[in-house]
Image (cartoon, rainbow, N blue to C red):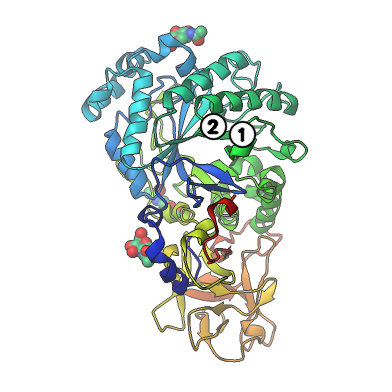
Amino acid sequence: MGPPVSRRVVALCLPLLPLALLAGERAAAVTLSTSSRWIVDQAGRRVKLACVNWPSHLEPVVAEGLGRQPVGAIAGMVVSLGFNCVRLTYPIALATNASLSSLTVRQSLLAHGLAETAGGVEVNNPGFLDLTLIESLKAVVNALGEKDVMVILDNHVSKPGWCCGNDDGNGFFGDRDFDPDLWVDGLTNMATTFADVPNVVGMSLRNELRGPRQNPEDWYTYMERGAEAVHAASPRALVIMGGLSYDYDLSFLAARQVSVSFAAEGKLVPEVHWYSFSDARAWEAENANEVCARASREFARRAGFLLARGLPLFLSEFGADLRGGDPRDNRFFPCAASVAAEHDLDWAYWALQGSYALRQGVAGMDEAYGVLDWSWSKPRNVTVLPRIQSLQRPNQGQFVYLCHSSISVIPSSNGMCHLMTGLCVVRSGAAAATLELGPCNETDAWGYAPPSSTLVLRDAAGLPCLRAEGRGQPARLGTKACGDAASTWRLASDSGMHVAAVEMGGGDGGMVCLDVGEDGRSIVTNPCACLRGDGTCDPERQWFKMVTSTRRVTRRPPADTIA
Ligand SMILES: *[C@@H]1O[C@H](CO)[C@@H](O)[C@H](O)[C@H]1NC(C)=O
Ligand SMILES: *[C@@H]1O[C@H](CO)[C@@H](O)[C@H](O)[C@H]1NC(C)=O
Ligand SMILES: *[C@@H]1O[C@H](CO)[C@@H](O)[C@H](O)[C@H]1NC(C)=O
């Protein structure tokens, strides 16, 4: 989300902002920890994780894509797409089975019948072919480090292969391929191996626990053991803990906290996943406003509540079919993005890979959720990229400590983001009274007081309020009768994302909603679409999320008051 603070404030802060933070929050060689619900660097400054998942846990245990593009080029695309971090997956066997980890990339690919991929690695990454599998993972981490990309190592499975099923033997402690002691050994080995690699900032203990054996009691027993093992071997690393039911559910943490010896060091970060398929039928059949409202409440219940308890929350997998053809994803993704924006979550998009060397027995399988295309050479769909990228910049947090200013507090203000395009509502020109979609990093700050008030652009002197002029007409800034029905806006649907007023001269009390004009750019008002009930129509065009920035500017406090 763009930083919805007034330009005045930004300008004030600029001279003191380190360059790394301006460049999309990039920060290598940082040691991260938590400070209440934020992840911060050594100086107490917020670092927002805007990650992308990159798998290296499938049968060959070779990072996907190495047969298609040079590793430096892939790392370069991660950066140019705006991500500051990669959640890099591995199977625990890589750290516990010496005959696996000592295989070379060439041997492992050939053993899986992937001569073509081996040929691709020879062309694109010749230095990798004769590295062992563990060396090749290190080389990928280093290539990301050279581009200042942070890495979170995620133990995705025990036995190499696609994840996940309830009965695949990898789901929960005690399953066929999930010996807890071996797992703890593996975590220790991995944490030790990467303890001194500066861009490895976190270790995720285990992806998507699940299956008939799962229960909270064992979760605490083993996850606390795993956490202690990782922290002992790599005290710098964030220790990231996923929940039950495919990392959908952390609600059990409401009743009992995680107990570890290093609690005071601020290293524990819960992670959660969210996809349309958890509520597939609802997204498909019901009214999207109602489903979004319900799914957001459910998200709060199963994980979001942790923020209010002073823990960060890492949305470490969420994603959508980027070809645009899945109606469930088209409704789900803007809804999930609105929640991620509202809470300014740390997150990791699933996924980077445009295709796999081998997935579920299919060589060269396409990944429709991948930000890269099948060949890993370019983005899959530039039209939808901003939906993801609008979430990359922080909109709240601890920048406050950077500004030595005499201003004590800037009242919170709102930015308005259009979730279907990932663009923000900006003025059409410096002095213009009309609005259009523009980049979220250039967004304007709005004053708005829910549930119903005028919408005032903070920096538009002489143009105090926004009015609904009628159907198909541009919404217009002006001085006229601020506060009458045509300039009093309320959030009209359960999703809270329809911004509605009564159209001017609307004798029939006609309500209109902010919408995108036929040019795909201008902000107009139109009759509100499918506010409730109807499950057949798509409201996303009229979904505008009001995102509150609570970024404050205060005098720099002493460092020890930050935590
Ligand atoms: C260790 O890895 C090798 C090579 O992939 C494999 O053949 C063997 O079955 C693995 N051992 C165990 C105990 O999983
Ligand atoms: C990109 O996404 C848009 C919007 O969902 C869709 O209409 C278009 O077909 C997609 N293009 C490609 C190449 O997938
Ligand atoms: C906003 O982002 C766009 C595209 O990334 C860039 O061209 C532009 O310079 C940025 N504007 C500001 C004010 O940073």
Q: Secondary structure at mark 2?
A: strand
Residue 151: give x, y in percent of width and height. Answer: 43, 36
Q: Residue furthest bottom?
A: 480
Residue type highlighted by circle 1: Gly
* Mark found first going from the N terminus, 2 or 1: 2
Q: Which mark is residue 540?
A: none
Amino acid at dot 2 = Ser
Q: Nearer the viewer, residue 535 or 351?
A: 351
Along the horizontal axis of the image, is 37 left or right of 362? right
Ligand 1 neighbours mark 1 (CB distance < 8 Å)? no
Crowd rating for badge 1 (residues with CA inside 10 Å; few <14, some 14–19, many 20+): many
Is residue 469 visible in the rendered structure shown here? yes
**Where residue 198 sits in the image (x, y, percent)?**
39, 35
| Helix, strand or loop status at disc 1 | strand
Asked whether 526 or 197 is in front, the reply is: 197
Q: Residue at x 63, y 38 (%)?
A: 264
Q: Are marks 2 and 1 in contact (CB under 8 Å)?
A: yes
Q: How many marks?
A: 2
Mark drawn on residue 204 = 2
Q: List the residue tagged with mark 1.
A: 242
Reply above or below: 175 against 359: above
Distance Cα–Cα, label 2 vs label 1? 8 Å
> Is residue 28 left or right of 275 when viewed as pictured?
left
Q: Residue at x 60, y 14 (%)?
A: 181
